[in-house]
Image (tube, rainbow, N blue to C red):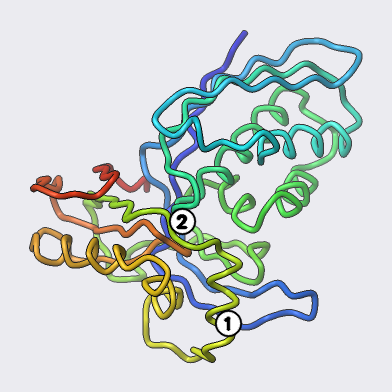
Amino acid sequence: MPRQILAPAKINLTLKITGRRNDGYHTLLSHVVFADFGDILNIDILPSKDPKFTLQCAGEFAKDVPKVNTLTKAFELFCQTYNVSCETQVKLTKNIPTCAGLGGGSSDAAALLRALFDHFKPAKNDDDLYNIAQKIGADVPVCLRAKPTLMRGAGEILEDFNMDDLNLSPPHHCVLVWANAGASTQELYDAYDAGNYHASELDNDFMAVAPQFCPAINEALAYLKDSKQCYKIGLSGSGSTVFGLCRKPFEIKNHSFPWLKTCMINP
């Protein structure tokens, strides 16, 4: 029977680039939370002698989903790791902009991994699930948790945190503004390394370089600041989405941004 799952949008309240490993991966320290909205996956897992995966996409950002994506990778790695076979049909309603710093593809992959794990109930513990997640992308392990998490290393070191630790007391209304398509995460890392922006005082170190590639980020931040409705604003991930935390629902005023969404932060 098909199962409907929410793949929530990820928001980086902070993001510090702490170093670079010998294998080229950067290490981070980031406080991550999740919204009460996101992509919707309708997943049907059927018996099959051979692994089969089909994906149908709908929604505002369906056209941006590549043919080879995090969902296809998640399915293939799960079947290989746990030595299982099935036919999995996914209908994805793509509500999260792609390449926006909101972890849409990562959250989609995490939702599928969890659905497959719950279906097969493999004898192995879910450590293997997190190993699969790391192979798909740095944000997939934290998206498997989908709760407030302090993320370290290259995304593999995860622990709980309380938003009170950041002096952010509830309620946590949120507004997300997607400024526009920016640079790739790799391009931003390269620019950050080239600029030697270490020991930044910014909540998100990518703010040192992201506006160079997407000037509309500064416009979105100014929009939220001028609204006088947000007690904290910032850049999520590598951008180009900015967020604002509010004590009450954000009142949307005239704007020209391609996408704006109000939501709540999940506790």
| Comparing labels 2 and 1, the label whose residue is closer to the camera | 2
- Image spot of residue 206 (x, y percent): 45, 74
- Image spot of residue 164 (x, y percent): 32, 65
Residue at image mark 2:
101
> Camera-side residue: 76 or 119?
76
Relative to 101, does residue 16 appear above or below in the rendering?
Answer: below
> Camera-side residue: 229 or 181?
181
**Is 173 positioned to the left or the right of 72 in the image?**
left
Q: In the rendered structure, find residue 68 and report the number of the disc placed on it.
A: none
Residue at image mark 1:
18
**Is 202 positioned to the left or the right of 161 in the image?**
left
The residue drawn where x is 25% and y is 52% is: 172
The residue drawn where x is 29% and y is 51% is: 176
**Is 130 positioned to the left or the right of 170 in the image?**
right
Numbered disc 1: secondary structure:
strand
**Is 240 positioned to the left or the right of 43 in the image?**
left
